Image (cartoon, helix red, strand yellow):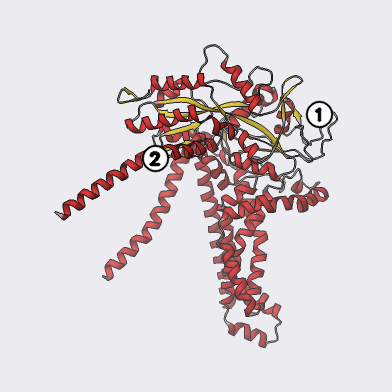
Amino acid sequence: MRLDRALAVLVVAMEALASGAQETAHGTGATFPYPLYARWAHDYRAKTGRTFNYQSLGSGAGLLQIRRGVVDFGASEIPLGPEELEGSGLVQFPMVAGAVVVVANLPGETGKPLKVSPDVLAGLFLGQIQRWDDVRLQALNPGRNLPAWKVGPIVRADGSGTTWLFTRYLAAKSPLWAGGPGSGPAVRWPAGAAAKGNEGVASYVKEIPGAVGYVEYTYAVGRGLTWLALEREPGEFVEPGPASVSRALEKALSAPGLPLELDLLDVKAPGAWPLTGLSYILLKADQRDRRRGKALLDFFHWCLTEGGAQARELGYFPLPPEMAAKVEARWAEKVRCRGERLWP
Amino acid sequence: MEALFRNATRFFAGLVLLLLGAIVVTLFVDALPAFRAFGPSFLVSQEWDPVRNLYGALPAAYGTVVSSLIALLLAGPLGIGIAVFLSELAPPWLSRPVGVAVEMLAAVPSIIYGMWGLFVLAPVLHRSLYAFLEERLGFLPLFAGPSLGIGMLTGGIILAIMILPFVASVSRDVLRLVPPLLKESAYGLGATRWEVIAKVMVPYGRTGLVGALFMGLGRALGETMAATFVIGNSHTLSVSLLSPSNTIASTLANEFAEATSDLHLSSLIALAFLLFLITTAILSLAKVLLWRMERAVGGGSR
């Protein structure tokens, strides 16, 4: 009798534990959106009690782990092609937009950022422009007192979506770059030193006088780094910020058709920040557990509809409502559990 | 009981060999695609280009060996000096606390050394030593600029600081084992303190001292986090000690999680295999050296 009761208690306890474990969803992926996903998970937990755990191991690791089904979702800035998605049975959708900014460690910063053209930017990272008082920089910044410091390019040591965005921009704008290092999540850097993660690059730039690097917008704001203004069209210099990134988003959204895998790089609109990109989430198209799959989509729905304030606060840019609606239409179309729809 | 005990311990010992063998085999098998793709040129190629999927081990292997040698050159004399002081010269009230402090340094996690190196040591070196070297000796390829504060020499210095406590504490234990009778006899014959240290203690303990140095070297070769922070992680081979470089261990730490192409992953594992070979070669060299020294000593006494 007593044994029966003890067993019953044990079974109930195990069930509770098992369901508790089910409540926690795991994700792995890019460092680019990490601060935001961590914040969203925290706020969502406070509201609903459900736990989401995001590890910023990098886009590559995220992709590998979601393919193998080790985690519930992956995150990356590099969208997969339709065949790749089909082949690995994955669904992909954007979650938030972010910006890559070029940051530098220069003396006596006044309010006005240093201006660079894409060619000069490529020159800095190719190791061709070796000093900050180079004539090419002086020509773009007349009247500015440039230091005779050496240029120290700081890049990413690990493969990353941030590098992918940055090198794709350089390759599109500078023939010299396209014919040299090219573009990808990791490239053969001709000059400078490399650090791991956005936080690593930010630390290096902060510590090394004359350093120039590229980081996600949040990291530039959070670490108090000074950024450079980029020449979008001859004579038009743009600074990163909510206004210029929104310009890029708005302009891209006005395009007909509106694909979800939207390319926000170098959008042709006055005032648009050229180094803008989307951060994507990857899910298994065929969810094994109905409740678990539904809980994931609920969370992402909450992020898309109610997470905008946190995103803006951290220096990210929430998707506009019409794009969020398209994301949810994709869930309805693609995400299944034993052949049944999970959304709406 | 006796048999059970013997078999159990034999099994444990066998497990170590099995584990080592399994690691070597796994590394080799996973590294095969890279070896097949690049052949022997993997060892001498300076290319490390994930865009074109071309990989070569030379910059990382060179950086590993050179940064570890710098560490050994700095930490070797310093560590043995500390050991001599602690075991022979220091008064007991000083030698005990300093000895404990040295051992505590060995317990500091390597990431702490790395962060301290990046945030404190590198900026200081950049402003003082490197600025001086670049200005006065910049004509030598060894000190050619521009320096960033992080690079081969900073990596070597951090590694030296990390292996110093190991070299010092093992050397001190070795020197303490010198029989007092030998030392007393030397003093009795009118030897000075310097003569006793240089002609009695160091020769007596030299196999142990060489062992301490190689233990430090082995640790420097495989050190990951601290090196990653300050060495610059650049896949370019440069003679200059001031320019950013790379080591095998820090390449693995940086790129392993992010390697998406199979060849990239395989090349990283091939690097790991190479590090294994380098470490084994250096340990074997140490054994040969010790064996020769022992033979020379043995021959002399006969």
Q: Position of residue A93 (x, y in %)?
A: 47, 25
Residue at the spot x=63%, y=19% of the render? A267
Q: Helix, strand, or loop for circle 1?
A: loop
Rendered image: mark on residue A239: none
Q: Which residue is mark 1?
A: A141
Residue B294: which quarter of the image? bottom right
Q: Which residue is mark 2?
A: A24
| B187 relative position to A5: left or right | right
Disc 2 crowd rating (10 Å Cα; few below 14, some 14-19, many 20+) is: some
Q: Helix, strand, or loop for circle 2?
A: loop
| A52 relative position to A341: left or right | right
Q: What amino acid is found at the position of numbered circle 2 in the picture?
A: Thr
Q: How many marks?
A: 2
- Residue in front for this viewpoint, A159 or A341: A341
Seen as rendered, the residue at the extreme right is A143
Q: Earlier in the sequence, mark 2 or mark 1?
A: 2
Q: What amino acid is found at the position of numbered circle 1 in the picture?
A: Asn
How far apart marks 2 and 1 lie (CA) works out to 53 Å
| B77 relative position to B298: left or right | right
Residue A224: which quarter of the image? top right
Seen as rendered, the residue at the extreme bottom is B188
Residue at the spot x=74%, y=25% of the render? A117
- Residue in front for this viewpoint, B183 or A162: A162
Residue A254: which quarter of the image? top right
**Subunit under mark 2:** A
Q: Position of residue B13 (x, y in %)?
A: 38, 61
